[in-house]
Image (cartoon, rainbow, N blue to C red):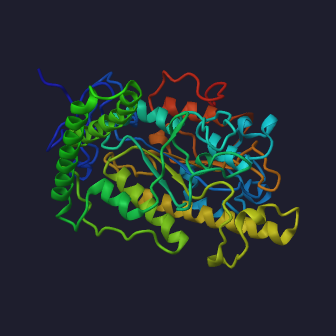
Amino acid sequence: MSTKLPYATLSRRTFLRGAGACIALPLLESLPIGGLFAAPGAAKLACTATGAPLRTAFLYFPNGAIPSAWWPSREGTDFPWSRTLQPLEKHKAHLQILGGLGHKNAEPGPDGPGDHARGNGTFLTGVRLYKSATNVRAGVSIDQVLAKAYGHLTRFSSLELGCDTGSRTGACDSGYACAYQYNLSWTSPTTPKTPETNPRRVFERLFGEGKPGERQANLLRRQQEEKSVLDFVLDDARSMYKRLSPSDKHKLDQYLTGIREVETRIQKTERFGPVKDPGIETPPGIPAEYGEHIQLLFDMLVLAFQTDTTRLATVLLAHDGSNRSFDQIGISEGHHDLTHHQNRKEWIDKVADIDLWYVQQFARFLDKLNQVKDVDGQTLLYNSMIVYGSGNADGNRHTHTNLPILLAGCGGGALHTGRYIKYPDQPMTNLYLSMAHVLGVRKLEQFGDSTGPLKDI
């Protein structure tokens, strides 16, 4: 009995048809346009209606934005573009400007100062942070909730990127641990996922070391070496286990748990077969110029999405409270210092220029996503949901309501784009809940301090 496919029959390989499996290995360019097939009634996690991968990313910029320069003067689909968002006008068809979202758990309350740590730490978790320099406790971030649901579909369940290369230990903002400011992604309330800042390391992690044509063999060799080391460690641990005290046995068990997680990751990588070599030179390390650093990381993310190496990513452009100067646009003062402008016009204008510069970097990233054709004939941007925002609203007053939030991409046609909408004040986590449902994770009924899905996104 033959099955009639709704699209052109695949010429080289068929797709996995299981719970949530809607695409196989990342050989996307070898498939005919529109040649996707998902079994009728099969669960489709992180997929569009056509069966193409649905990518999601969360991008964070620091210190809020100048509200008067960020927000358009009216809502709707014919809104006038604001000074800060002007570079995104060409992407209007793939964009929503979302007002009214906030993080009440980032507000001071009894915890006093520390708005930068709270703004950063609550952005993807929606929980109140425990104020301590050593006893870290946040919450599982939305990207890792999603990764647990469908991360098994790709070689890497998620990708964490960032531009900050300084110290990430000890106390940072008013007694809060630095971990809150230097991480967006959390696998548990006590375990952040440290972002990779070096574009070269990101590339080699995704595609292997060496020149084009050498990477598959190098990656296979490295995996075999890692397996040999793990086998040796496990054998050695088993031989000494009986001689250890109960306390040391507990420590060893914790260590072996980490070893087994590495082993599981290696096995998962092997399950997806040879890595597709993108055929380009390995990028350099961290560039001296900040804009180039950002764009290289964005390039790595585009490649990861294009090859279906992952469908989930976080990018920390800079930690909240960052006092970086922007000499490239003629601003020698620190960003954070300028945000406390006390209504001085010159300082406000400089902060607005920095906000504009960050949006220009974001616009270039959207350009790249929109230039890559996806397997269903759409573009990567069309088949994505990209959150761009900050955990602070007005940096001068350290507010956390009406955060500057954009949602780019069409979600494969599931989103209502091309508009500015301001919701009645509600949790940012409501947006995450709605995104999870678009991604097929409908069993998620509550996240952080959410009160329900954000309507009409």
Residue at 59%, 36% in the rendered image: 125
Residue found at the far right of this picture: 343
Q: Quadrant of residue 153?
A: top left
Q: Could you tell me residue 331's position as x and y percent?
A: 70, 76
In the image, 255 versus 422, the foreground residue is 255
In the image, 204 versus 274, the foreground residue is 204
In the image, residue 269 sits, relative to residue 150, either above or below, namely below
Q: Quadrant of residue 123?
A: top right
Residue found at the far left of this picture: 1
Q: Could you tell me residue 33's position as x and y percent?
A: 27, 48
Q: Can residue 294 be seen in this view?
A: yes
Left or right: where does residue 356 sit relative to residue 311?
A: right
In the image, 13 versus 234, the foreground residue is 234
Q: Could you tell me residue 284's position as x and y percent?
A: 37, 71
Quarter of the figure that contains the N terminus? top left
In the image, residue 320 sits, relative to residue 18, either above or below, namely below
Residue at 61%, 50% in the rendered image: 170
Quarter of the figure that contains the C terminus? top right
Residue at 19%, 58% in the rendered image: 218
Q: Could you tell me residue 58's position as x and y percent?
A: 53, 47
Q: Is residue 98 visible?
A: no
Q: How many numbered discs sit on the rendered protein?
A: 0
Residue at 78%, 69% in the rendered image: 349
In the image, 371 versus 303, the foreground residue is 303
